[in-house]
Every structure is written in structure tokens, then in C-alpha cells.
Image (cartoon, grey):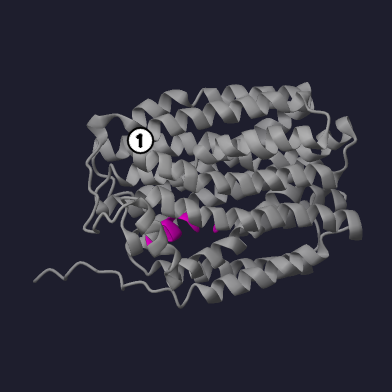
Amino acid sequence: MLRSLNSRAALIVTLSAAGILMVTMGARQSLGLFVSPLNTSTGLGIATISFALAVGQFMWGAIQPVAGAFADRYGAAKVLVAGLIVLAFGSALTPFMGSGFGLVVSLGLLSAMGAGAGSFSVLIGAAAQRLPLEARGTASGVINAGGSFGQFVFAPVLQKLIQSIGWMGAMWSMALMTLAALPLVRVLVDPKHATHHHGAHEDAGLWRTVRQAMGDRSYLLLHAGFFTCGFHIAFLVTHLPGEVDLCGLPPTVASWSLAIIGLSNIVGSLYAGSCVSRYRSKHILAAMYGSRALLVAVYLMAPKTALTFYLFAAGLGFTWLATVPPTAAIVGKLFGIRYLGTLFGLTLLSHQIGGFLGAWLGGIAITEFGDFSWMWYADMALAAMAAVVNLPIREAPVLRPAAQPA
């Protein structure tokens, strides 16, 4: 599965990017654990806290094309360092915020923008420009798996910290963990690891390439599918602890469910990265989205026990963020990798518009109706739609190696 990363330089680049994503995604994807203790401490209400996290979902996506464009033009190092510092500052500032507006600033703006600047668009773009063509699909899977491993590690650790030193101490601890990733930036961008394989696409300039992409039907269909992915993930990562509580189960079930999602997605991300070189990415995406609709339907019919949540988490986790490698692969096939950070960043913006709605509407649903039933139905419908809209995407067949003569 990892045979294409057969050089020391390629492995170092890939693992460094994966390590940075482990920290930024681990911190970001574990914020749902803070909703209940934040509400108890501040009395702001679930809807207000959900809105702050929903703003964070949107801002994480909104910063992606901006960070990608800066990285494409000025280099990834400055963007990654700034992102990690801002993420740490937002986390450290949160315990001092006692209003909804304050949480929007610390979690919705600062933390989200910092995590976004140190996330997929910049990291995958930076790695792609330092790797040969045959290694990029596998590398994107490994990098993506780093983010999932971060969720697996951060969720139970932060839950334990919340229980032992309180949510404020857990937030400050998360800020220190973020700063610990800074040395990896230097390793990732070290010039001796670069191979500079930009591919055969003509460099038409950043803004001309963006205009061309926004007029491309396949690119827009990719955005539509990724929108539903964002809705699904943000709803679950924000409100799964609330769903667990509604079922009368302890908070540890939620933290371990999030951890299992991350662990399962490590396998899913590596598998998705290997599939990119063997199958059309649009078919991979259609299968992933369709499986989510089926899994939610099975969950709704199952008894709500801890085992059900763990099995549900394992099933969902396999495709959780494993959609990233095939999505990035389609963008690269359509437009090349010179501006992959920017173009994939725009795709991630669509993802996070869906994420904003998933986090925010989940808070409204629990406030107005007392449960998440309508959100589960919406999630199923959107997942099924995403499976369908990926199929018409224009994508050339995967070239397979010619058979060797006997």
C-alpha cells in the first residue's frame, strides 16, 4: 500500500505533513467534547455554543483557499507557522471568554482560522509539489490518516484532561500541544526533500486558473458532494456527545466513539489513497457517500447501546475524511498541481459551508425538538445525493501498467 513512498525524502515529506495535520485536526475535531462543560460553566446555552462552533466550521473552510493561495505564491512555511500559532492562541484565549461573542472570536475565528491554515489545502499542496506523480495518491492518504490519528489520540486525552483538571486546563494543554508541532514545519519545507514535479499542465496564472475552475461543471459537482460531506462530519463531531447523552450513556462513550472514528479513518484514508491509483476517484467518492446513508439508517434502527455507538463509529470512520484523497486527486487531474492549494482550498470551503449548517442546525434541532431526528434524516438524504452527483464528473480512466511479456 505504501510502496510508492519508496524514497527517504518522499517518506519524510509525507510523515511531516501527516504530523502537522495530526495536531491541527486532532484539536479541531475534539471540540465537541467541550460543549457540555462550556455550557455548564458559562450558562450560555447549547444553541449559542453550537453557533460559535458553526462559525468555526465555516471559517476553517473560508481560510483554506486564502491560505492555499498564500502558500502557492509565497511558500508553505510562513502559512503553517502562522496557522499553528493562531490555533494555539485561540485555544488559550477560550477560557477567558464568557459570552457568545467571545466564543465566536476565540473558537469561531482564531482557532478555526489557525487550524485551517495548517490543514489539507496547504499540506497536501506542499507535499504534492515535493513528490513524484506516482507517490501523490498514497501520500495524500497517509497525510489524511495523520489527521485521523490526531482525532484518535486527542479525543480520549482531552476527555481525561477535562475530567481531571477541568475544561479550562484542557484548553490550555491543547494550546501547548499545538505549539509542539512547529518543528515539523521546517522538516516539511526543507529544500533537500523537494523533487518539484509540477506535471504537464500549463501555468495560466492563479486567477485565470480559478476562473477556469469555477466554470467547470465537474469541479462544481465535486463541490456539491463535498458540501454534504462537511454537513455530515460537522454535525457528528459537534453533536455526537449530545446524542450519547440523550441515550443515557456516559461521556466516555462519546470520547471513545470519536477516537474510534479517528482510528478507523486511518485505515480508510490509507485504503482510499491506494485506491486513487487503481480506480476512478469519482466512483470511490460515490461508494463512500452511499455507504454513509446506509450506516445512518442502520444506526437509527439499532438499540442505543455503547456497542452500537462503537460499531457505528467504526463504520462511519472508514470514510470519515477518506474522501480527501480522491477529491484532491480529481482537482489535480482537472487542473494540475501548481495551484492545488488554492483550488482544493475552494473545494474545502464548500465542505465547510455544509459544516456550518451541520453544526448550527444540530444546535437548533436539539433546542427546538429535544432530539436530533430531523438532522439524521437530512444527513441520510444529503449523503445519498452526494453519491449521485459525483457520477457525472469528467474524469479520465485510470492508466494501468502494461502487462509484462512472458
Q: Position of residue 34 (x, y in %)?
A: 76, 36
Q: Work out whether 206 lies above or below 114.
A: below
Name the residue located 56 percent from the left edge and 51 percent from the top edge: 264
Horizontally, is 368 left or right of 241 in the view?
A: right
Q: Tell me the kind of residue under disc 1.
A: Gly
Q: Position of residue 244 (x, y in %)?
A: 80, 50
Considering depth in this image, is 178 or 227 the residue closer to the camera?
Answer: 227
As helix, strand or loop, the secondary structure at mark 1 comes to loop
Which residue was labeled with disc 1?
Answer: 75
Q: Is residue 73 visible?
A: yes
Q: Does the magenta stretch include residue 382?
A: no
In the image, residue 4 sits, relative to residue 380, either above or below, namely above
Q: Residue at x 45, y 33 (%)?
A: 79
Q: What stretch is highlighted in magenta?
A: 318-330
On whether residue 323 falls in the magenta region, the answer is yes
Identify the residue at horizontal 59%, vertical 61% (top origin).
227
Q: Which image quarter holds the C terminus?
A: bottom left
Quarter location, residue 401: bottom left
